[in-house]
Image (tube, rainbow, N blue to C red):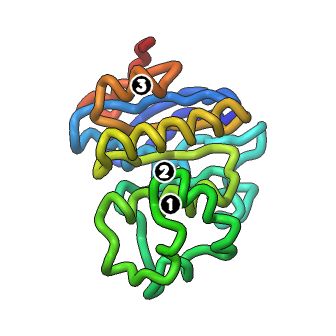
Amino acid sequence: MLTVTGLKRLHLSVSFDLQDGECVALQGPSGVGKTLLLRSIADLDPSEGTVKLDETLRELMPAPAWRKRVTYLAAEPGWWSDTVQEHFTNWDDALPLVERLGLPADCGPWPIQRLSTGERQRLGLVRALMLRSRVLLLDEPTSALDSASAAAVESLIAERVANGTSVIWSTHDNAQARRVGSRIFLMGPHGAIEENRP
């Protein structure tokens, strides 16, 4: 279980528990702090408060080890090498997920510049899923996708949730929030969240 208690970052101030195998949809207008919250939980930005995974404090774990367990996926994932497959420790292992998300098996040698925003978004998700994290923090992972690609992402994440992965899924799509979330967190302009049932 992920436990967040009194997490403060700029205007944010939130507390909640995320059970194993639970997906919570995070909603709110642009600029209220959804990305700030996800990045703070992943220890990518400094924050106050307590974040624990199975009673282990985030501070007691080296940051890279924490981020392999509690993985943040940006809406626009970063790229640092020239080709797609250079971003994966084992491209062959990644291929089933790549194809599942509607990308061709031969996209490994493609230059990153060739990719559309939606292709980069799906490949970023594959990269995150390869870590087999306990918690996935997804920042609008389908914002650049058509409905078929978005449905493939939802299906894949639902399988991970069924196998015990916990997910916080930020989305502006109300229908998607109701589909993917067992709970909905609404973030207001003052950085607090209130819970709604879908």
Where is residue 131 drawn, in percent x and y?
67, 59
Would you place residue 28 above or below residue 38 in this image? above
Q: Residue at x 47, y 46 (%)?
A: 138
**Tag 3's secondary structure?**
strand
Q: Given the image, on which type of amino acid does mark 3 rest?
A: Phe
**Tag 2's secondary structure?**
helix
Residue position marked by numbered label 3 in the rendering: 185
How far separated are the C-alphas under marks 3 and 1?
21 Å
Q: Given the image, on which type of amino acid does mark 1 rest?
A: Leu
Residue 89 located left or right of residue 77: right
Circles 3, 1 touching at the beta carbon (< 8 Å) = no
Circles 2, 1 touching at the beta carbon (< 8 Å) = yes
Residue 70 located left or right of residue 144: right
Looking at the rendered image, the quarter that the N terminus falls into is top right
Residue 110 located left or right of residue 171: right
| Residue 148 vs residue 150, the one in the foreground | 148
Q: Residue at x 77, y 38 (%)?
A: 54
Please say whether residue 190 is visible from this viewpoint.
no
| Residue 100 vs residue 120, the one in the foreground | 100
Picture quadrant where residue 75 is located: bottom left
